Amino acid sequence: MHQFTIEPLAGTGNWEIAGHNIAFTNSALWMLIAAVVLTVFVAGGMRRQLVPGRWQMMVEFFTGFIDDMLEANIGKGGRKYLPFVFSLFMFILFANLLGLVPLGIVGVHPFTFTSHFTVTGILAVLSFSIVLAVGFWKHGLHFFSLFVPAGTPWPMIPMIAPIEFISFMVRPFSLGLRLFVAMMAGHVLLEVLSSFVINGGNGGLGLGLLVGIPSLVLMIGIAALEILVAGIQAYVFALLTSLYINDAENLH
Amino acid sequence: MPQIAQLGETFASQLFWLVIFFGFVFFVVGRGMVPRVMGTMTDRDKQIGDDLAAAKTARDAADTQEEAWRVRENENRAAARALVAQAKAEALAENDRKLATAQERLDVQLAEAEQRIDASRRSALDEIESVAVEAAQDIVQRLASVKVTKAGAEKAVREALANV
């Protein structure tokens, strides 16, 4: 569990806003790294060549991917959410992937800030507030008809509407918790397996080979799976955000 | 679990720095760079579309020209064919004419030759007759000592020769 511990790096004493300490922590450091790497990555794809190179191709693949997703889920009006959903997807993706980089070998410990529900929760609440803002901006109080699915017989409305309302209000929690749980579970699994390898090795040569080798092989497989999960969870977050925005944008 | 254990002391810091860095990503990358990347893609799609349209126009023009060329070619071929047919017909007529004149000449020659042959044969027959008459008179005189008149012998010879 040590890998999830937030350690202040600077500003523990006097960096405060309204009495709350805002120390620059390892979590903030990896947010900074993710932001910088992402900026460098996208900046490298801005050569605006007619025939794209590999880097430009990669960046255009990601923008095109999110653009297609928005168009498929929201329609023509989806393109105006591209900056937000793209930032969300890439920021989470880079955070997930950077947290998996085996820098422990050289003594630096990567910190996966998406394994903290404070971070994923804030991002989920951000998505949810955009949904609310878009919904009420575009449809006004008519947005409440979201809780009455089209074609509901009127006697059912008093029962359906509260259920729909609860399921709507659960969205930010499920959105934030899903990412947090997936990232944390993956890292814990890798840690458990690596502790098998190390403790098995400490227990002698025979036990080390018996326990260590299968654990290492499994660990390599799980590590590959974690890279996949890093992509999938970022995608799921962006996909669900776009689906929720679709509710607000198109309202049935 | 540090996520829960440190919740109170780190929440403000997490919120503050996340807002700072995600805000940076959103405004610099999302709002600043992504539209330009998308613009490049749109421009490229437009360029490809324009190029395809130009290629289609060029191909249509080529098709039209080829069609025109084919029509012209067909006309030329038909004209050539007519010319050949005419020449053939003329040659045929000339041939017929030549053959006809040659045939006429041959016919005349043939008729003359036949006449000559007839005349020769007739004179030969006459000669044979006269010789046969004399011979018959002579033979009869020697064998039967009968003097046959020339007219009688001629009659007999002519009867005998009619059967030849």
Image (cartoon, coloured by chain):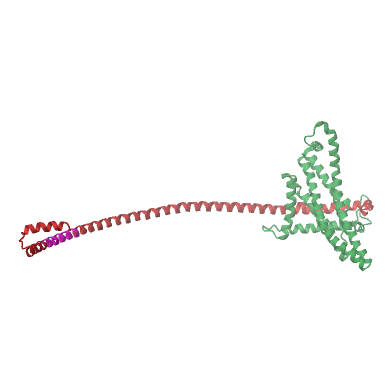
Chain colours: A green, B red
Counting from the top left corner in percent of width and height, residue A151 is at: 77, 34
Q: Name the one closer to the observer, A111 or A84.
A: A111
B94 is within the stretch colored magenta: no
Q: Residue at x 6, y 57 (%)?
A: B151
User: Residue A89 at what x, y percent from top left?
Assistant: 79, 52
Query: On the image, which quarter does residue B111 sit in?
Result: bottom left
Q: Which of the 4 image quadrants contains residue A147?
A: top right
Which span of residues is magenta-colored? B113-130
User: Is A66 on the left or on the right of A218, as rendered?
Assistant: left
Q: Quadrant of the N terminus of chain A?
A: bottom right
Depth order, front residue of A252/B10: A252
Most foreground residue, B96 or B163: B163
- Quadrant of the rendering where the C terminus of chain A is positioned: top right
| x and y, in percent, of residue B73 in the image | 45, 54
Q: Is residue B152 above or below residue A160?
A: below
Can you see residue A79? Answer: no
Q: Residue B42 at what x, y percent from top left?
A: 68, 52
Image vertical order of residue B106 relative to residue A246, above or below: below
Main SS class of the magenta portion in the image: helix
Does B120 appear in magenta?
yes
